[in-house]
Image (cartoon, helix red, strand yellow):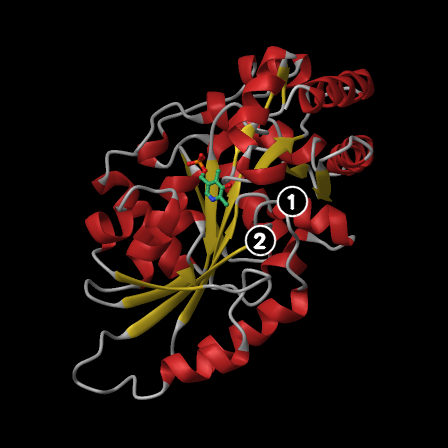
Amino acid sequence: MIDLRSDTVTRPTPGMRRAMAEAEVGDDVFGEDPTVRRLEEETAALLGKEAALYVPSGHMSNQLAVYASTESGDEVWAHRDAHVVANEQGALAVLARVQPRVYDSPDAYPDDALLEAWIRGADDIHRARPRLVCLENTFTGRVVPRERQLRVARFTREHGMRLHLDGARLWNAAVAQGLAPEAVAEGADTVSVCFSKGLGAPVGSALAGDAETVAAARRARKLLGGGMRQAGIIAAGALYALRHHVDRLAEDHARAERLAAGAAEVPGLRAEARTNMVVLTAPRGRAHRLAGLLADEGVGSVVLGADRLRLVVHLDITDADIDDAVAGIAKAAAAL
Ligand SMILES: *Cc1c(COP(=O)(O)O)cnc(C)c1O
């Protein structure tokens, strides 16, 4: 199967497995795992933040950021489809016990008018206290321009709010724009990044930010049972990915372009490449049926909605896989 469901399906490369097998380890709950420490330091440096914390998942990273940045009952603003509200069960309500307030917007970021409207009367006794804005970049593969984030950051600073960036695929946003990761993280008080998506590591994400917030997140990670012992074994895979698999994301983006160009030739389909993803639009609400037909052709996809599905290019996808996937898409669409 050409597995284009997600960039999380990659297997560790031989070099990565070697790094993991040879990793220097210690008890990370005692702060004594040198590989975890190195990963946290290099991640923080790349993102231009004071400190970072290695965690098992992007979900935990996002939720620790919210937990460490808010008090119970505070209001958290996010796009209605943001992972932190739409795909992490009800964790905002269960863990940090905050109230999400969600907006819609074409490029996933809130505009000035919305921010100004929502902050007006914030000190009214009836209102929850607006405390945190959560942004996401890339957003379903789409890159959000840097200037948009800096405007939101100016707003949060001015109003005593904080800004969290869900950068599960921040590396893709950086490579696509030719920017340093630090520039993509600029203005965010906290930023979550994944090693187990485009970078191809088997396990883990990191939360980066100022030392005080990261220390609070470290405490909360333990509260949730996320303290790990000789975690250097898996951190070594993440560190290897960070050192060797960031620049190569450009290859995934080029393959996604080629996949989209091939799919767009197929009658009845529309295709849009967004960094390492291709969003396919099927006619008349037939995304589920198309996904089923694609699976029959050996092409894995994920349905996004009635009309749309996504194909995600990653480390284990070759040029030949792209050719085969385009052929499979053509056959599936003919049977639609
Ligand atoms: C995958 C993803 C996460 C969560 O990462 P997990 O490691 O799967 O928990 C968070 N945010 C975004 C935008 C993601 O794509």
Placement of 124 over or under 181, stated as above or below: below
Q: Residues within 10 Å of mark 2 (few under 14, many from 20)?
A: many
Q: Nearer the viewer, residue 295 or 49?
A: 295
Q: Is residue 60 visible?
A: yes
Q: What residue sits right under mark 1 in the picture? A: 171
SS of the residue at dot 2?
A: loop
Left or right: where 332 falls relative to 71 = right
Mark 2 and mark 1 in contact (Cβ < 8 Å)? no
Placement of 22 over or under 247, stated as above or below: above
Q: What residue sits right under mark 2 in the picture? A: 137
Q: Position of residue 85 (x, y in %)?
A: 36, 51
| Residue that sits furthest to the left in the current view | 125
> Which image quarter holds the N terminus?
top right
Q: Is mark 1 within 8 Å of ligand 1?
A: no
Query: CA gap, disc 1 to disc 2?
Result: 9 Å
Residue at x 59%, y 53% (from the top left corner)? 47
Q: Is mark 2 within 8 Å of ligand 1?
A: no
Q: Position of residue 262 (x, y in %)?
A: 82, 30
Dot placed on the residue nearer the N-terminal end, 1 or 2: 2
